Amino acid sequence: HAGLWGFAKSARLEYPHLQITCADFCDEEDAAPTVASAPIPRSPLLGQPLESELALRSSSVLVSRLVRNPLGPERALQLDMAQRGSIMNLRPAPQTKRVKPGLRELEVRVVAVGLNFRDVLNVMDLYPGDPGDPGTDCSGTTVNVGEGIVTGDSLFCGDEVLGWVPGCLCTYALAKRRCVVSRPEAWSHPDAAALPTIFSTVEAAFSDLAQLKPGERVLIHAAAGGVGMMAVKYAQSLGAVV
């Protein structure tokens, strides 16, 4: 019934007055009478269901909640993709190999990864050509540096960084020095990991190509997406009219 529940999600957004509620019942025949009598949480004022998706099990009504898992990895892990074509092919696996940084490279212990639509196309085998391993944007801690990184680079072991790190869906990943920068202290790792691709895309489009100036007008399509929202903020910061 996943397709039906997905349809209901879209219908709720487009027709909120319909008050669509989805309920999942257990398959046990002997539990049916008990399930039917289970109380459904309702608004004390309107009498309407407080939840749009319910699962009825025995005498209980279950609802979905997203909570942070308190458990952390006990060893280095990487995302294993046996083959492209389905998200179900993704599995966590031990990261048994770490590559020493080469010339002007550094090794990053990844803390947060920002996923893009490109990663979805990659996994689903819909991206033209070979996109490489999933994952590009990340934030983490420098744990090793290669040759050619000197004092003027201002990056050493223990420094917090963010940037483009292809194949970063793992605990330890290699990055090119030119593709990472220091993480501002005011930014959390998840915040920093969400920025590299969208900010670089917008800056290249508005600054390098369009050379957008204060007072100019710009039309931004799909402004609700990651790149779109960044484009709006960037254009406004330049004084342009969106």
Image (cartoon, helix red, strand yellow):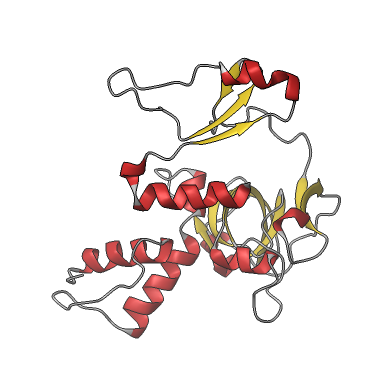
The quadrant where residue 76 appears: top right
Residue 33 % position (x, y):
64, 17
Front-most of residues 86 and 193: 86
Work out whether residue 160 can be spotted.
Answer: no
Front-most of residues 124 and 228: 124
Residue at 40 percent of width and 27 percent of height? 50
Work out whether residue 1 can be spotted.
Answer: yes
Image quadrant in which the C terminus is located: bottom left
Residue 218 % position (x, y):
23, 76
The quadrant where residue 206 appears: bottom left
Residue at 37 percent of width and 72 percent of height? 203
Is 92 displayed left or right of 164 in the figure? right
Is 87 displayed left or right of 138 in the figure? right
152 up-or-down from 5: above or below: below
110 up-or-down from 40: above or below: below
Residue 223 % position (x, y):
33, 65
Front-most of residues 46 and 120: 46
Q: Residue furthest left?
A: 215
Count of numbered tags: 0
Residue at 70 percent of width and 62 percent of height? 146
Is 150 displayed left or right of 129 in the figure? left
